[in-house]
Amino acid sequence: MRPVRRGASPQPDDFAPYKDAQPHLIARMGRYCSYCERRIATQLAVDHIQPKGVAAYADLIGRWENYLLACVNCNSTKKDKNVGLGDVLLPDRDNTSAAFAYLADGRVEPKVCLAPAVFLKARDTLALTGLDKKIGLALDENGKQVAIDRVSQRMEVWATAEVTRSDVTSSPGNDAVRRLAVRVALGHGFFSIWMRVFDDDPEMRNRLIDAFEGTRDSGCFDPVTTESVSPAPNPDGLAFGGKL
C-alpha cells in the first residue's frame, strides 16, 4: 500500500459537495486507488476514511483530512465500516510500505517481522477493503476459467514488471529504457509490486518514488537507499499517525 502525502487543504473551508475535492486529491496523489493501488482512469471515488454513513462522523463529510481515493471494489467493501484511526494502518499517515508483503501469486500479506500489535492492525487494514480476499474465478463462453479480480490483476502486473525489469537489466546505462519502465509502471499502477520487483535497483526505485504523485513527499523512503523510513514522519501531523 503506497504511502502518500495529501498535504494541506487547497481551501480554507470544508468541501460542499465533497466530490469537489476529487481533482485536488488526484493532483496530489495520482489517479490510483489509495488501497489496492490500481490505476483508475474513470470513476475514482472520494473515499471518506471515517465513513460518511456513520452518524458519529457526520461532521467529517466535507473534511479534507478525511479523504483518500478509492476504486469501486475497495470503496464498496469498506462501505460504512467503522474505522478507528488507531486501529488500522493508513497510507496518508503511516508507512504502509513497511507493513505489507506483495507476492508473485497476487497475495498481499502483513509482513511477518511486524510487532504483534502492528501485525493485527495490518491484518485489519487488508480486511477493511477486502485486499485479503482469495482469487475469484469465472467461466468464459468456452467454459474456461478466467481470473477476474484484484488478485489476478496483481499477478498480471507482476508479470509485466518482471518483463520490464528484464529489459532494464539487459540495457545497463540506457536511460531511455528506464524512463520507459517508469511510464509502464505509471500506466498500470500497483506501485508496491514495481518496488518489490525492482527491490535490488535503488535507482529505479527512486524513479518510481518520484514519479508516483505524493509518494516522495510522504517522507517514507530514504532518498538514497530507498529503504522504508519507519515510523512514518507524518509531516502533516495527522491524528494517530506514525504507528509504523
Image (cartoon, helix red, strand yellow):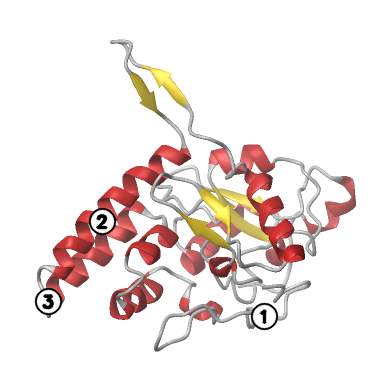
Circle 1: is it few (<14), some (14-19), or many (20+) Cα within 10 Å? some
Q: Amino acid at mark 1?
A: Asp
Mark 1 residue element:
loop
Q: How many marks?
A: 3
Contact (Cβ within 8 Å) of mark 3 with mark 1: no
Which label's residue is closer to the chain start, 2 or 1?
A: 2
Q: Which residue is mark 3?
A: 172
Circle 2: is it few (<14), some (14-19), or many (20+) Cα within 10 Å? some
Q: Which residue is mark 1?
A: 236
Q: CA distance from mark 2 to mark 1?
A: 35 Å
Question: Foreground mark, 2 or 1?
Answer: 2
Question: Foreground mark, 3 or 1?
Answer: 3
Whether residue 17 can be seen here? no
Residue 172: % across, % down? 12, 76
The front one of 17 and 28 is 28
Mark 2 residue element:
helix
Residue 43: % across, % down? 49, 42
Q: Which residue is mark 2?
A: 162
- Residue drawn at (38%, 76%), measured in percent from left and top? 210
Mark 3 residue element:
loop
Quarter of the image holding residue 96?
bottom right
